[in-house]
Amino acid sequence: MTTLAYTDLQTARRFVDVVLSLSQLGLATYGRPIVLANYTDVTPTLSSADAIEAAIDEVEDVVAGSADAHPRRYMAALVRGARTVLADLRGDDLSYGELVAGCLEIDHRPVPESETRRLRQELHEGLGLLGYDGSLERQVEAWLAATSVTGDDVIRYGRSILARAREATERTVVTLPPGEGIDDFGGVRDVHYSGKSRYVGDYRGTLEFNVDKFWQRDLFVHVLTHEAYPGHQTFYALWDHLYRQGAWPMEAAFYQLNGPTNAVFEGGPEASLHFLGWDAADTDEALRLRVALAYMDLGRVAMNDACLWCNSGAMTKDEAVALMVEHFVLPDDAERAHRFFTSRQSRANYAQYYYGRRIVKLAYERFEHSETERQRFFDLIYRTPHTTSTFVQAVADASGAPFDPFSYT
């Protein structure tokens, strides 16, 4: 196998060692590894914070001398992210804003109230078209009661969608590696997350979904495509395949939580349903999906803001739950979200969901009007390693116009 490197192979292996060693070091603090996939044969060897810091210094010196713009910017962001994780594990005095900026390359700010008003109006109009009358509150209550599933029905419903999503992904988005597939699809209880894709290796993965939740059926379609096709399972398997072909650099041949690649890695799956075009047609199914996405986005605004305010000390748990419920998040889901975004590890990356969806959705709008441009975009997001900042720059370069997904009109 020919191995591609953005620096050189020795430095690339050193950096992967840094990331894997940070994951090992963080087990005691975070309670879980931060590396979720590793396509390389590198194993962690750095057993102390000082050893990791010295290795980061070595990598940074090489990166600083790199002449190639994209690899240099990509690696510089990863080095900053590794330093931020190390500082967090050491207990350095980082503000919440510094933690998120260092990990995600995102300035986590409150979402403008105009976004809430826009989404409430969109949801109200959509539910009206679906036949639900009255105030938005009454519409949402009736809609959820009529269209939600829980327990084993969630898994049965999901299995009915999975093959369709995989076929549509191969036909309209990307070709999956030979032998790719899902080995297990099941339910899980007593967890804070909604769904999870685990990469097993050799292009195989597993899927699990929280069956304690009451799932609005059309919103579940979004979560399934997010976790599977053309979402996380697709990204995991494709990147593994590209690495084996010598078309993906070693410095990107892993997936790490709390890093500057997180927003793109979550944003792509967050836009997966739209990549398939299932929400774009003039059909009842597409309308139902658009309504579910408006509902999700409205709740996500509150979750994102509650995460910011709770972790910066400006909001209590009760206030956060009340804010989310006001945005139509179910009380149990609001409790789970609070547990998620205040956890020692996830507090650093929770903004990846709101901002990742916004960044990728706005980027895709620039390319979705022709099949040639769509495929150009898919090359950008699926076949090119990116951090938040390099993706924003690449979208601007490829579309020929400035791109600022952090501004609101």
Image (spheres, rainbow, N blue to C red):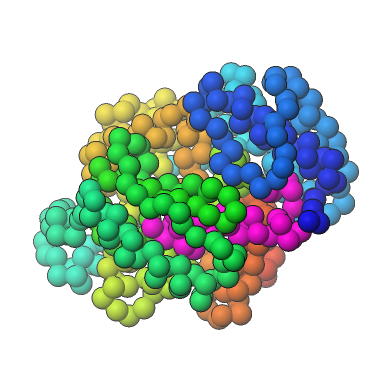
In the image, is residue 93 above or below residue 235? above
* Quarter of image, res 19: top right
Q: Residue at x 33, y 54 (%)?
A: 296
* Quarter of image, res 159: bottom left
- Per the rendered image, the range of residues in magenta is 224-253
Give the image location of residue 211, x and y in percent: 27, 46
In the image, is residue 179 above or below residue 32? below
Left or right: residue 364 versus residue 83 is: left
Left or right: residue 313 versus residue 393 is: left
Q: Quadrant of the N terminus?
A: bottom right
Left or right: residue 137 versus residue 258 is: left
**Dominant secondary structure (helix, strand or loop) of the stretch shown in magenta:** helix
Give the image location of residue 297, x and y in percent: 36, 54
Give the image location of residue 134, x and y in percent: 11, 61
Whether residue 97 appears in this view of the structure is no
Give the image location of residue 174, x and y in percent: 57, 69
